[in-house]
Image (cartoon, rainbow, N blue to C red):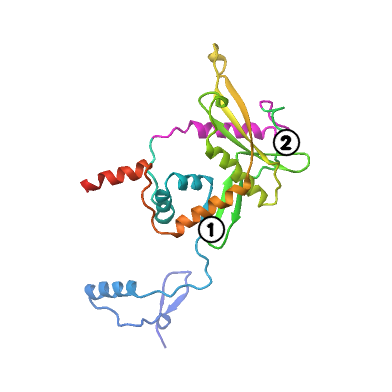
Amino acid sequence: MTPRRKLSQGHLFVSRSTRKPTSWPRPSTFREALTSRRAARARPRPETSGVEKKRVWLSATAIESMKRCPRCFWLEKHEGIRQPEGIVSRLANRFDAVIKKYFDLYRPNGEVPPMIAGRVEGKLQYPFQEKYWYNLDDRYGYYGKLDECLVTNNGRYTPVDHKTASSDPTTKELIPAYQYQLDSYAFLLEHNGRPTTGIGHLIYFFPGHGEKLHQGFPMEISVKTLTTNPQNVLPQIKKAIAVLEGPLPRPHPECQFCAYVDRVKKFS
């Protein structure tokens, strides 16, 4: 009879004869053990069939990164190497969270906040769906995270994006990335069974002037309505995929990060 050893009270008895046999002799020295481990690592591992590769998720932010510098975009997605981040103010993020909580107060009643009443059509989506996803194929997908969404009486959806500004944005030229952002939201809504109104809103919040700041800091609100073009999104996604499927791109001539790396090469 094969001897058994009791591990501890409450555990099963384990037979030594049930140990998995090794396919090579047990190493007797540390050197032999180290050599054996290295050999095991070097053995080619069979590929697991039927397992889907990890999907690469793209977004409006990723597309803008690709436009600024395809090389930095490629390195981030392939190698996880991101551009260094400088000093960033978190005030905008905190301000955005406060605005969303304020909007949530009016959501269940089918109303819009007084600050935008009469400037937009529809009511706040209830319940609100923030994230939307779209699978392009087995390898790539696209997603977006809305700040807000309005629904009209005829069941059409209008994406809304909150923006903070330092001054009145109506006096400034529209940032192209903002247009693509709304286009992207409309694209995702359409591909998730939510027909859109063909427009999107940018709601700007910026500080106003006041002589009694001790009674409250005045904030100005400006609503800018844009025509959305969801058909412009897929071509940009395909461009981004083409960059990722190709070799490492050359440094972009206007990319400050690529220029910095190229200049310090001589010191390395």
The location of residue 55, given as percent across then percent down, is 52, 59
Q: Which residues are magenta?
A: 87-115
In the figure, residue 183 lies in which quadrant?
top right
Q: Nearer the viewer, residue 29 or 264?
A: 264
x and y, in percent, of residue 126 in the image: 71, 41
Answer yes or no: do the residues labelled 1 and 2 have beta carbons within 8 Å? no
Q: Residue at x 67, y 42 (%)?
A: 128
Q: Is residue 109 magenta?
A: yes
Query: Which one is earlier in the sequence, the residue at label 1 or at label 2?
Result: 2
Q: Quadrant of residue 117?
A: top right
Was residue 170 drawn as part of the magenta stretch in this picture? no
Q: Residues within 10 Å of mark 1 (few under 14, many from 20)?
A: some
Residue designated by label 1: 140
Element type at mark 2: strand
Q: Is residue 151 above or below residue 46?
A: above
x and y percent of residue 95 in the render? 54, 31
Q: Quadrant of residue 103?
A: top right
Q: Residues within 10 Å of mark 2 (few under 14, many from 20)?
A: many
Q: Which mark is residue 19?
A: none
Question: Please, what is the three-letter code of the amino acid marked with disc 2?
Answer: Lys
In the rendered structure, which amino acid carries the disc numbered 1?
Tyr
Residue 208 lies, in percent from the top left, at: 55, 19
Mark 1 vs mark 2: give the one in front: 1
Q: Quadrant of the N terminus?
A: bottom left
Residue assigned mark 2: 123
